[in-house]
Image (cartoon, rainbow, N blue to C red):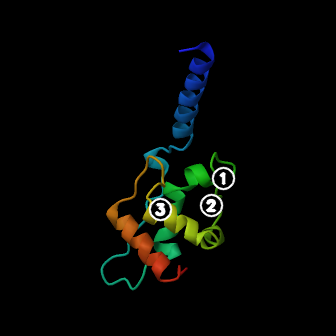
Amino acid sequence: MKTNQRFIYIALVLFYVLLSISCSKRQADEVVPQTPGVGASTVTYTNFTEALIQTKCAGCHGTGRSAAGIWNFNGLASITSNEARIRRVVLETRSMPIGNSLTATELSSLREWFDNNMPN
């Protein structure tokens, strides 16, 4: 491998390592989203989605974070204005969150929230 190619390879590896580190959060610091219990009428932003997005997305997509230029989570308005994009990458292609997959229950609750017109 030529020196220039080796440099590019090493730079790419370092980039991906740094990206994965910058998007990680300590488990103890995470807000745990509460899945509505039996008999709950609907999933809301307040009782589920806010904590899920804060825990699973804001580590990278929060203001001043590495992926904020792609999408910046700064509350409900930032989600509602990017609904189609979020649905696609989280629920359809499941390409987000990187390295931090959502459980079947979280995916189901998030889908329910979107399908019910994102109640507060």
Q: Residue at x 57, y 18 (%)?
A: 6
- Of labels 2 and 3, earlier in sequence is 2
Query: Would you call the spot at circle 1 few (<14 residues within 10 Å), some (14-19), or many (20 or more)?
Result: some
Under mark 2, the amino acid is Phe
Q: What element carries label 1?
A: loop
Residue at 42 percent across and 82 percent down: it is 42
Packing grade of label 3 (10 A; few <14, some 14-19, many >=20) is: some
Residue 70 as seen in the image, left or right of residue 48: right
Left of 85 or right of it: where is 43?
Answer: left
Disc 1 to disc 3, C-alpha distance: 16 Å
N-terminal label among 1 and 3: 1
Q: Do the residues labelled 2 and 1 touch (CB within 8 Å)?
A: yes
> Which circle marks residue 90 in the picture?
3
Counting residues from the start of the chain, the first of labels 2 and 1 encountered is 1
In front of the other: label 1 or label 3?
3
Q: Which amino acid does label 1 sit on?
A: Ala
Point 39% across, 66% down: residue: 107
Q: Where is residue 81 in the image (x, y as percent from the top left)?
A: 65, 72
The alpha-carbon separation of the residues under discs 2 and 3 comes to 14 Å
Q: Helix or strand or loop: what does disc 2 sit on?
A: loop
Label 2 sits on residue: 73
Q: Quadrant of residue 63?
A: bottom right
Residue at x-position 32% and y-position 84%: 39
**Position of 65 relative to 10 (above/below):** below
Q: Where is residue 86 in the image (x, y as percent from the top left)?
A: 54, 65
| Quadrant of the rendering where the C terminus is positioned | bottom right
User: What residue is disc 1 on?
Assistant: 68
